[in-house]
Image: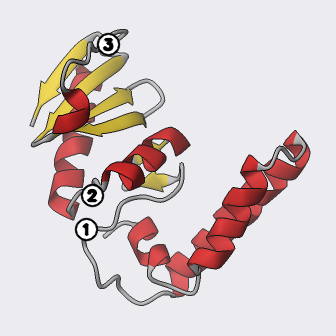
Amino acid sequence: MSDLSVAMNSAIRADSIGRVDGELRSGNSVGTQDKLRADFREALARASQSAPAATNPLQAPTTAHAAGGLKWSGHAVDRMKSRGIQFAPDMMKNIEAAVAKAAGKGAKDTLVLAGDNALIVSVKNNTVVTVMDRAAMRENVFTNIDSTVVI
């Protein structure tokens, strides 16, 4: 289970996360935004060390932090939330393995097809850039990728 799943079910509450997210989006100075991000990362780290095991294994990452090795951009997290996309721990391992396989072949930006979902991953940054479900994939053209991995 990822630290993010544990942190989501711990002492960090939605209201504090919403406050940080709201302040980040409100146009505060870059220095203030960096401080808020650092505070949020610290709170996540503390919560993951002291929290009980998560009760929901399908929790999606909620920040651009690492989830088992992959990082998730804010854009990817927003898309997962808005589209109701969640990955089980075994699927997360499969996605990570797919990215590792693409990296082994020299890929830089890859499309990972995972069941009914697609992820665009910056392999060189080990970061999921965006996530979409089958409905969002319809009539889309995927550009600026150099590889595809099907899980």
Q: Nearer the viewer, residue 133 or 6?
A: 133
- Mark 2 or mark 1: name the one nearer the start of the chain: 1
The residue depicted at 42 percent of the width and 77 percent of the height is 6
What is the CA distance from the residue labelled 2 to the residue labelled 1? 6 Å
Q: Which residue is mark 1?
A: 58
Quarter of the image that includes the N terminus:
bottom left
Query: Callout 2, which amino acid?
Result: Gln
* Image disc number at residue 115: none
In the rendered image, residue 131, in percent from the top left (x then y), is placed at: 33, 38
Residue 53 image point, x, y percent:
35, 85
Amino acid type, label 1:
Leu
Judged from the image, the secondary structure of the residue bearing numbered disc 3 is loop
Q: Quadrant of residue 20?
A: bottom right
Residue depicted at x 44% and y 69% = 3
In contact (CB < 8 Å): disc 2 and disc 1: yes
Residue position marked by numbered label 3 in the rendering: 145
Q: In this picture, is 66 found above or below 43?
A: above
Who's the residue at 54% across and 48% down the image?
64
Where disc 2 sits, the SS reads: loop
Residue indicated by mark 2: 86
